[in-house]
Image (cartoon, helix red, strand yellow):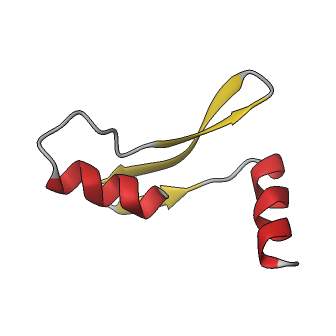
C-alpha cells in the first residue's frame, strides 16, 4: 500500500498523499512517508502484529 501511494502521488495530477496512515482504536498514525531520500515505512507494534498474522509468522 505504501508503494502504491508513493507511486500514485508521483504519477497523478490528483490530491493523493504519498503518506499511509494506520487507523487503530480511533487514532491515525502515519506509517509511511516519501521524501527525496525514498520511501520510509515505520509500522506500529499493532500493525507489525497484523502483518505477521498475514504472512503466518
- 24 vs 49, left or right, is left
- Identify the residue at horizontal 82%, vertical 50% (top origin): 45
Q: Is residue 53 above or below residue 6?
A: below
Given residues 40 and 15, the one toward you in this image is: 15
Residue most toward the left? Answer: 13
Q: Horizontal and vertical percent for residue 25?
A: 80, 26
Residue located at (49% from left, 58% from top): 1
- Say whether residue 28 is left or right of residue 5: right
Figure quadrant of residue 52: bottom right
Describe residue 12's horizontal placement relative to residue 30 as left or right: left
Residue 10 screen position, x and y as percent:
20, 54
Q: Residue furthest bottom?
A: 56
Would residue 30 be seen by someone viewing this image from the given angle? yes
Above or below, comparing residue 2 to residue 23 in the picture? below
Q: Position of residue 17 (x, y in %)?
A: 34, 39
- Judge left or right: residue 36 versus residue 54: left
In front here: 44 or 12? Answer: 12
**Above or below 30: residue 39:** below
Q: Residue furthest top?
A: 26
Q: Nearer the viewer, residue 33 or 24?
A: 24
Name the quarter where the C terminus is drawn: bottom right
Does residue 36 appear in the picture of this structure?
A: no
Q: Position of residue 12 (x, y in %)?
A: 16, 49
Q: How many marks?
A: 0
Point 47% across, 57% down: residue: 2
Amino acid at each position: 500500500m505504501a508503494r502504491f501511494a508513493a507511486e500514485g502521488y508521483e504519477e497523478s495530477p490528483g490530491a493523493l498523499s504519498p503518506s499511509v496512515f494506520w487507523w487503530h482504536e480511533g487514532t491515525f498514525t502515519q506509517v509511511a512517508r516519501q521524501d527525496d531520500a525514498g520511501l520510509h515505512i515505520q509500522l506500529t507494534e499493532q500493525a507489525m502484529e497484523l502483518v505477521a498474522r498475514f504472512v503466518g509468522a
